[in-house]
Image (cartoon, grey):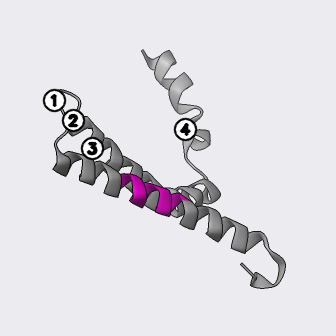
Amino acid sequence: IVTVQDAVTAFADFMEPTDAELNAIEQEMPVILADVDLLDAQIVTLDRTPTEVDERRIRRARRRALAARVALVNRAAGASLPGGAA
């Protein structure tokens, strides 16, 4: 057991996310949360026929997810353009 533990913990420093990776995750968090909301709305309807309210919830969640993706792409595009033009 000690040998296995040494092998696992020998690479512990390499297993931690870098600051750049953490910043990327933070930038993508609105997209991640919007996707989770969309999945929640879809999961509710897996075992039953969606009602009109369910369909509206899914549409709203889909629009929020798409809007979050567009905002992320626009931020990335704006950051890569010279002069700060978007």
Q: Secondary structure at mark 1?
A: loop
Vertical relation: 64 (above or below) 12: below
Q: Secondary structure at mark 3?
A: helix
Amino acid type, residue under disc 4 in the picture: Ala
Q: Quadrant of residue 79?
A: bottom right
- Residue wearing tag 3: 40
Disc 2 vs disc 3: Cβ atoms closer than 8 Å? no
- Residue wearing tag 2: 45
Amino acid type, residue under disc 3 in the picture: Asp
Amino acid type, residue under disc 2 in the picture: Thr
Question: What x and y, as percent, mark residue 2?
Answer: 45, 19
Disc 1 vs disc 2: Cβ atoms closer than 8 Å? yes
Instruction: Please say whether residue 76 is one of the residues in the magenta stretch.
Output: no
Majority secondary structure of the magenta segment?
A: helix
Quadrant containing the C terminus is bottom right
Start-end of magenta stretch = 61-69
Question: How many neighbours does mark 3 have within 10 angstroms: few (below 14), some (14-19), or many (20 or more)?
Answer: some
Image position of 55 (left or right of 83):
left
Q: Residue at x 30, y 48 (%)?
A: 58
Q: Nearer the viewer, residue 22 or 44?
A: 44
Disc 4 vs disc 1: Cβ atoms closer than 8 Å? no
Whole-angstrom CA distance, mark 4 to mark 1, is: 45 Å
- Residue wearing tag 4: 12
- Residue wearing tag 1: 48
Labels 4, 2: front one = 2
Identify the mark nearer the N-term, 4 or 2: 4
Q: Residue at x 25, y 47 (%)?
A: 55
Question: What x and y, as percent, mark residue 77?
Answer: 71, 67
